[in-house]
Image (spheres, rainbow, N blue to C red):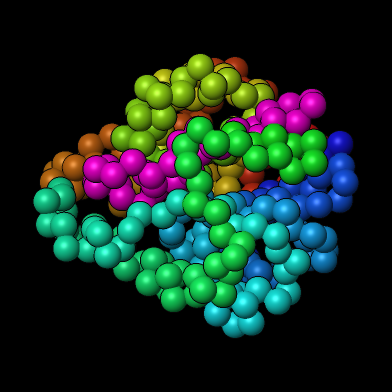
Amino acid sequence: MATLYMLTETSKFMMSFVIVTDKNNCIIVDGGRPLDMPLLKEAVGGRHISAWILTHAHDDHISGFTDEMAKNSGADFDLEKVYYNFPDYDALIDNHNVPDYTYFRTELEEMLPAFNAVKEKFAEKEHIVTQGESIDVDEVHIEFLYAFHDGLYANLMNDSSLVFKMTTPNTSVLFLGDLGPDGGDVLFRESRDKLPSAIVQMAHHGHMNVSMEVYAAIMPKICLWCAPDWLYAEPEVPAYLADGEKLRRMGRIRMYGTALTRRWMDLLGVEKHYVTADGTQVIPL
Ligand SMILES: [Fe+2]
C-alpha cells in the first residue's frame, strides 16, 4: 500500500507532498522553499524518486527544488524524472494586453528566471507535461487533467497549475495545485467526468481557489489543506480581499477566503480534514 506524506511548513506557507509506493519508490509534489528542504529530505529518506512533479512556478512550491539544483544539481536526491509545464517567460514578458501588467510581470519574475537558470542541470530528466497524458509509478497511476492554458492572465501562475489525479488500487487523490477560479472553470469544462475523487488537495491552500462546482464534481470524503493556522482559520474577509474595487480592476472578481471554502466542504459532507497546521500528515493510499 502506498503512503502519502503531506509535509508541514517550516517556511511561512508552502506545499510539499511525498508519496512512497509499495515498492519503496517516491513521488514528490512541489517541496516548498529552501527552508523546507531538510524535512523533505527526511521524508524521502534516500529513496529513489521516480517522479518529481512541479505544479507551478511560485516560490512556495518550487524555490526549494530550484535552490537544490543551483547548489549542487540536486545531488541530495536520487532523481529519475521531473514533470512540469510552465508558462514561457520570453513569450509573455512583453505582453501588455493583460488586466494588470504590473502584477502579471511580478508573476513571471517570481520564479521563472531562477528556474530557467538551472534547467540545464536536469535537462535529461525533464518531461514537459501534456494535458491528458498519464504516468505510472509502481502501483500509482497519475493522469494529468489540466496544464497551462495561455490567456488566463489575471491569476497567471496559479492558473497554470498542473492538475492530476493519482489512483491506487484503494483510492484516488486529486491534486489541484494552486488553481484559481478561472482555471477551475476550464478544468470543470474539459474534465468534469474525471474529477470524482475520494481525496482532494485543496486548491491554493484553501483560499482564492477553484469554485464550488469543481468541489461538487469531485465530491471528496477527505480534504488535504496545505495551510498553517493563520490561513486555515483566517477571517471571513481577510485584509487582502477587503478592497473589492482593486480586485475587480485586476480581473480577480471571484476571490474568496478559506472560511467560505470550509463551509462548502461542510455542505458537501466531507468526513475528514488533514491540515498541515497540525503537523505532517500521514495518509495511507
Ligand atoms: Fe502556493
Q: Position of residue 190 (x, y in %)?
A: 40, 24
Q: Is residue 61 above or below residue 161?
A: below
In the displayed structure, 207 sits above or below 9; it is above
Q: Is residue 163 magenta?
A: yes
Determine whether 254 is above or below 112 in the image. Answer: above
Foreground pick, 64 / 257? 64
Q: Quadrant of the N terminus?
A: top right
User: Which residue is found at the position 39% from the left and 66% from the top?
Assistant: 112
Figure label count: 0
- Residue 163 position within the rendered picture, expressed as x and y whole percent measured from the top left: 51, 38
Q: Residue at x 82, y 66 (%)?
A: 46
Q: Residue furthest bottom?
A: 71
Q: Is residue 85 left or right of residue 137?
A: left
Res 10 quadrant in image: bottom right
Please determine whether, in this image, residue 195 is positioned above or below residue 144. above
Which residue occupies the foreground of this view, 187 or 254? 187
Q: Residue at x 54, y 21 (%)?
A: 194
Residue 173 image-quadrant placement: top right
Task: Give whichever of 270, 126 is nearer the camera.
Answer: 126
Percent of width and height locating residue 267: 51, 18
Q: Is residue 205 visible?
A: no
Magenta residue check for 114: no
Q: Indicate left or right for 177 with 37 as reference.
A: left
Pick whichever, 20 or 83, lies toward us. Answer: 83
- Quadrant where the C terminus sits is top right
State the extent of the magenta-drawn residues as a range.
144-173
Give residue 242's position: percent from left, percent from top. Answer: 25, 46
Q: Is residue 165 visible?
A: yes
| Residue at x-position 70% and y-position 76% | 75
In the shown orientation, is residue 280 left or right of residue 212?
Answer: right
